[in-house]
Image (cartoon, rainbow, N blue to C red):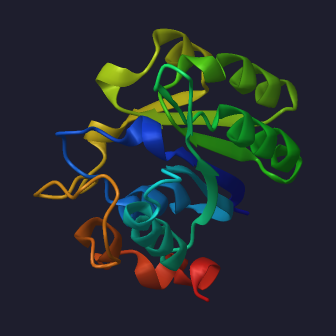
Amino acid sequence: MSLKAGLYVDAANLYRKDGPSINYRILKDFVTEERELLRCNAYVTVDPENPKPVKGFISALRDIGFKVIEKEWSRSVDGRVKANMDMELAVDILTQAENLDVVILASGDSDFVRLVRAVQNLGKRVEVIAFQDRVGFDLIKEADAFNALESLEDIFMATPDPPQPMTNETPALQQVSKHEDRIGRFFRR
């Protein structure tokens, strides 16, 4: 019997301005090996003054099976941008965990340490996937397992894509997965 899993991606936390782009299809494939993926959520922020660049990225994520939860940025009086999706992600995990055996959190944000403990108190396994150099030690210590993004085969594209692609032609989202036939039945529309 395969484990029922949920993948929750904090997209802003996985973005590196001048670094390699993540192949979200490969990330999903990694999570689904020997597991049934019941939830596959990505949390994405949108600039309300210029939503167009991120819309293609959101559409491409949806095309490969992610449910995308969007939230507009807000600006404070001093001009700083606030685009925090932590609460949305935490609430979704806590409300959906009862139907899962494993929760996979793709974020290195140490603010999620208490969330990890709460999910474990429900009797669920919590795994964290994040950049090795951008994950809080407390989060690694609390999780049942940790995987560095850098260690996942083919997780990065050879050339960086823009953080919020203008079209659905983004290679990181369009590359055909080597596991497509095995897991495609869960995500085809």
Q: Is residue 177 visible?
A: no
Give the number of callouts. 0
Give left or right: position of 10 versus 17. Answer: right
Report x, y in % for residue 55: 46, 68
Q: Quadrant of residue 120?
A: top right
Q: Residue drawn at (82%, 45%), measured in percent from left and top?
A: 97
Task: Using the image as rendered, state which of residue 162 and residue 96 is in the foreground.
Answer: 162
In the image, residue 53 above or below residue 76: below
Give left or right: position of 29 versus 20. Answer: right
Q: Quadrant of residue 124?
A: top right
Task: Using the image as rendered, state which of residue 133 and residue 124 is in the foreground.
Answer: 133
In the image, residue 16 above or below residue 170: above
> What residue occupies the far bottom of the structure in this picture?
189
Give left or right: position of 82 versus 98. Answer: left
Report x, y in % for residue 15: 35, 41
Give left or right: position of 67 versus 31. Answer: right
Q: Residue drawn at (84%, 32%), measured in percent from left and top?
A: 123
In the image, residue 188 above or below residue 102: below
Q: Quadrant of the N terminus?
A: bottom right
Task: Using the image as rendered, state which of residue 74 and residue 136 is in the foreground.
Answer: 74
Report x, y in % for residue 42: 57, 54
> What residue occupies the far left of the structure in this picture?
159
Task: Using the image as rendered, state which of residue 22 and residue 154 is in the foreground.
Answer: 22
Report x, y in % for residue 77: 55, 23
Q: Residue drawn at (23%, 52%), measured in percent from left and top?
A: 156
Q: Is residue 185 visible?
A: yes
Q: Residue drawn at (16%, 54%), measured in percent from left and top?
A: 160
Q: Quadrant of the C terminus?
A: bottom right
